[in-house]
Image (cartoon, rainbow, N blue to C red):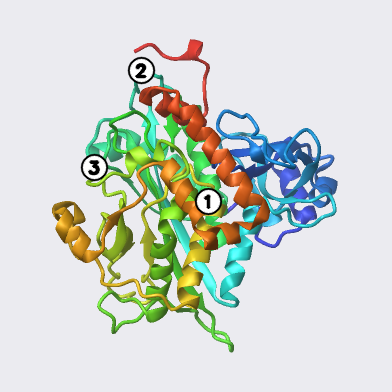
Amino acid sequence: MQPTSPAPGAGPQHILESVLRHEVDLIRFLWVDHNGLTRGKAVTPDVLPSRMVSGIGLARFRQACGLADVGEPVPGFDAVGEVRLVPDPDSFVLLPHAPGSAAMLCDLMTVEGEPWPACPRTFLRDALSAFGELEVVAAFEPEFTLCAAPPRPDGLDLFDDSLCLDNEGFEAANDFAVELVRALRSQGIEVQGYHPEFAAGQHEMTLLHTSALRAADRFIWQKAFTKGLARRRGTWATFTPVPYPGMRGNGNHVHLSLWRRPPGGGPSANVFADRGDPLGLSQTGRHFVAGLLAHLPGLMALTCASVVSYDRLRPGMWSGAYLGYGLDNREAAIRVPSRLRGDDAGSTNIEVKACDSTANPYLALGAMIHAGADGVLRQLDPGEPLNEDPGRLDEQALRKRGVKLLPGSLEEAVDALEADEFLMDVLGPLRRVLYPAVKRADIREMKQLPPQVACYRHAIRFLPYKRPAALRSR
């Protein structure tokens, strides 16, 4: 299927031509807030060319809102002041689930046209500059839960009850999965694979790796298409980490590698790859891993960004609850995947497991890159890889190997973030105050709720929501 969206590099005129050709009436200007929620405003084709230059006005206050949509009392975030939503033409897509609508992802700019310090996409761009000419390549692996009806505080109606990798799961969700693959491909977004996951109703679709900024953009479109197409079919897809207490949760693992393009042209080389190393990792790759491990407790406030994230991050859940790394070790926070035969160098990468879809992907990925760059700059040593299942080791054996559990709550992770001066410094003077304030507000609110209601609140924030009167009876 040929992509129907303009090619990368298309300017405002080409975007407008595509809008008119496909009879689009509304073009959404979207951004992602500090709770990983996609928000935005829309314009009509009549004003699109001018608004692509000027942007759309947005109250600064919006970036200080938590899941309850209540702004936190952070200096500079009140009724006064605004920024601009300025779209990136390269992010333009037609929305297959919303006929007549298209969308672009936006940078948050000041009224003077400068990058705003609370802009997530700018944060990721700044992180990428740490590696100069080297290219960071990434891919997200989001899991989601399919429901036959919207979640309720007292439970879920799951779409299927198949087992992990069960062919019955393929059969149950086939029409939806094929439609989703085709929808993504129609917008130039290539899918690598799909399978039913461990929990009932749980599925995973993985996109092909690409440059880091585009990987984050494409993850946003994947979430939007998945939820939108499910809703049109009368089903519901949620990316929340734990849809209901006791369920095996939805992660969003991140794969990373670093590439260098030769000065004279030719194919790029994977800087992480070393055929002579037992793990296949170069010294640069090991330093990068060490940087991630050094900062991972604080990073988790950005990568596992909700209160319910930590109900998933438990030993024995293969969620990466242990601070360590290892070859194909699914209990370690960082997994080094075994290389693919016939493509040793090309398939060398690292997988950060301690991440889920409540994270803002630009902040999570940018912070990981900053941490990895710190490890490379300081030539940190990650230590010996964890070659055993840490869940089968006693406390003495874990201490001997230096293996610890990661933070067990969002509150602990935010404490670790604020104690990590390196991460606080890269967040910048504005976000280092703003982000923890938003997260602590969510912590306070969720502490007042029973676990099933907290899960419900997150579930309805991460899928299209119908009011309770429209809920299907059990």
Amino acid found under the numbered disc labelled 1: Pro
Q: Are marks 3 and 1 in contact (CB under 8 Å)?
A: no
Amino acid found under the numbered disc labelled 3: Cys
Q: CA distance from mark 3 to mark 2?
A: 25 Å
Q: CA distance from mark 3 to mark 1?
A: 26 Å
The residue singled out by tag 1 in the image is 361
- Secondary structure state at the residue bearing disc 1: helix
Visible residue check, residue 222 = yes
Quadrant where the C terminus sits is: top left
The x and y percentages for residue 366 are: 55, 59
Q: Residue at x 50, y 77 (%)?
A: 377
The x and y percentages for residue 47 are: 84, 41
3 or 1: mark nearer the eye: 1
- Quarter where residue 459 is shown: top left
In the rendered view, does 364 fall on the left or right side of 280? Answer: right
Instruction: Give neighbour class at mark 1: few <14, some 14-19, many 20+ (Cα, 10 Å).
Output: many
Q: Residue at x 65, y 33 (%)?
A: 71
Q: Residue at x 72, y 59 (%)?
A: 10
472 and 408: which is toward the camera = 408
The x and y percentages for residue 156 are: 35, 23
Q: Earlier in the sequence, mark 3 or mark 1?
A: 3
Instruction: Give neighbour class at mark 2: few <14, some 14-19, many 20+ (Cα, 10 Å).
Output: few
Q: Is residue 156 above or below residue 405?
A: above
Amino acid found under the numbered disc labelled 2: Asp
Res 164 label: 3
3 or 2: mark nearer the eye: 2
In the rendered view, does 213 fall on the left or right side of 157? Answer: right
In the rendered view, does 78 fall on the left or right side of 411? Answer: right
Q: Earlier in the sequence, mark 2 or mark 1?
A: 2
- Secondary structure state at the residue bearing disc 2: loop
The residue singled out by tag 2 in the image is 154
